Amino acid sequence: MRIFVAGATGVLGKRATRALVAAGHDVTGIARTPEKAAQLRDAGITPVTVGLFDAAALSDAVAGHEVVMNLATHIPDVRSAMRSRAWDENDRIRTEGARNLVDAAIAATASRYIQESVGFFYEDGGDEWRVEDTPLAVPEFAASFQTAEAEASRFTASGGVGVVLRFSMFYGAGASHTDTQLKTARLGLSPFPGPKDAYQSFIHVDDAAAAVVAALAAPAGTYNVAEDEPATRRELAAAVGRALGKRISWSIPGMARMGGAKTEYFRRSVRVSNRKFKAATGWVPAYPAPDLGWQQVVAETSTLR
């Protein structure tokens, strides 16, 4: 299939586009710089320089593609995330950008549209599983992801297949927040703020990329993409400690409260179920639980140094 990917050079997009090429697809990816265009070309991906906010040019670029994927995000780094304005670009991508991309997909008579979304804003549930129709509790700064999801539904309403992938928190070598978590853990502190026995669901970025490929066979709808066995923060800290060969103590008291409303969701217990997506596509994560995944991350991070 001919597949157009926005966000092709991001943490997820970089891996997903290569997985799509390996699966035999003809992939076009947005590249915003000559250097990133060269990286895509070297990976067998056709680069195109176009902005999500230039509706006419985007429509021209998407023409002729059977599948359109929106994997584009602009998540601010940990130091900037507390500033409201730091999320403006991400909000625009999920509102205006998603709208333009769906318009382009409809104009191209694409058969499928896949939208990256967020799977960690469910209401607090203790040890109960969070499924796709569990009520959400979305902080104001992140509300734009619901707008992006609605655009995928609009594509379905137009006669195509719109698929929303609600990813749990990414982790993987080369991801800036993962680097920060490992630095924190090497100091002997847990990088997972919040109550020790509350669940926090993750997904290894390689498994997330495989899920993007699997979504080519998913019926229209919304799907959680998470580990098979989400862990509590206590268990996560222990897994990272084992991977590093480091004894991890608990985090700084009150750390999860320091950001106010922007970090409130870190105090929730969100045990996300991936059963619907697995049943629909046959996708199986290579890293079903934290121990194996964090061991891989530490090993790969060491080779990147």
Image (spheres, helix red, strand yellow):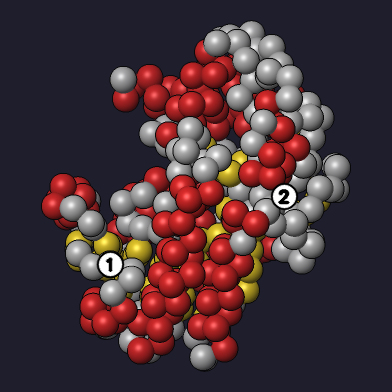
Q: Position of residue 137 (x, y in %)?
A: 75, 56
Which residue position holds label 2? 272
Q: What element carries label 1?
A: loop
Real-space Cα separation, disc 2 to disc 1, in angstroms: 33 Å
- Kindly state the secondary structure of the residue where label 2 is placed: strand
Q: In this view, does 79 lie to the left or right of 108?
A: right
Q: Quadrant of the C terminus?
A: top left
Viewer can see residue 238: no
Residue placed at 23% from the left, 58% from the top? 31
Q: Where is residue 57 in the image (x, y as percent from the top left)?
A: 23, 78
The residue drawn where x is 48% and y is 50% is 85
Three-letter amino acid code at the position of disc 2:
Val
Q: Residue at x 36, y 58 (%)?
A: 7
Circles 2 and 1, Cβ within 8 Å, touching? The answer is: no
Which of marks 1 and 2 precedes in the sequence?
Answer: 1
Vertical side of 152 occupied by 174: above or below: above
Q: Mark 1 points at which residue?
A: 51
The image quadrant that residue 157 belongs to is bottom right
In this rendering, would 185 be left or right of 258? left
Residue 292: mark:
none
Percent of width and height locating residue 138: 69, 57
Q: What residue type is labelled 1?
A: Gly
